[in-house]
Image (tube, rainbow, N blue to C red):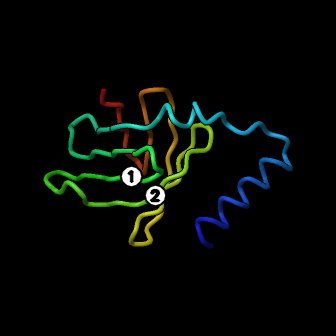
Amino acid sequence: MTPQKLLERMAAAVAVAGLPRPEPEEEESFIGLWVTADGRIRHELLPDGRYVEARGERERAYCGRYVITGRHIDYWDDTGFTADGDFVSEDVLHHAGMVLYRRW
């Protein structure tokens, strides 16, 4: 399934369920840098819907696009890998078994 088709299905499910769509301001509030406690993994969520993940010394280990729906995030890496996560607070992201913290 293409990312666009997934987005269309998600939007349709939200409409059918009568759930409110997240406000753009809420989605935009998660844009920025997210880092593991040891600093080894760094996610930068860019305003254009793209992300860059650094791992250790590899500054661009993974790159791709993301979509935030409410407090949930879906990732599509440029190589085809997919992942997701949840913002459990304004400053904590649980992603693929990792905990990342907002870096101001």
Q: Which residue is mark 1?
A: 51
At label 1, the amino acid type is: Tyr
**What residue is shown at x 13% (from left), y 53% (from top)?**
57
Nearest to the observer: residue 63 or residue 73: 63
Classify mark 2: helix, strand or loop: strand
Please give the name of the residue rendered at 31% of the width and 60% of the height, measured from the top-left corner.
Answer: 62
- How crowded pointer 1 is (Cα within 10 Å; few <14, some 14-19, many 20+) is rated as many
Q: Quadrant of residue 21?
A: top right
Q: Is there a contact, CB below 8 Å, between mark 1 and mark 2?
A: yes
The picture quadrant where one finds residue 70 is top right
The label shown at residue 65 is 2
Q: Residue furthest left?
A: 57
Label tally? 2
Please indicate whether residue 26 sits to the left or right of residue 103 in the image: right
> Which residue sits at x=52%, y=41%?
86
First in sequence: mark 1 or mark 2? 1
Of residues 16 and 65, the one nearer the viewer is 65
Q: What amino acid is at disc 2?
A: Arg
Look at the image and tell me in which quarter the C terminus lies. Answer: top left
Mark 2 closeness class: few <14, some 14–19, many ≥20 residues within 10 Å: some
User: Is 68 displayed left or right of 91 in the figure?
Assistant: right
Q: Residue at x 65, y 63 (%)?
A: 6
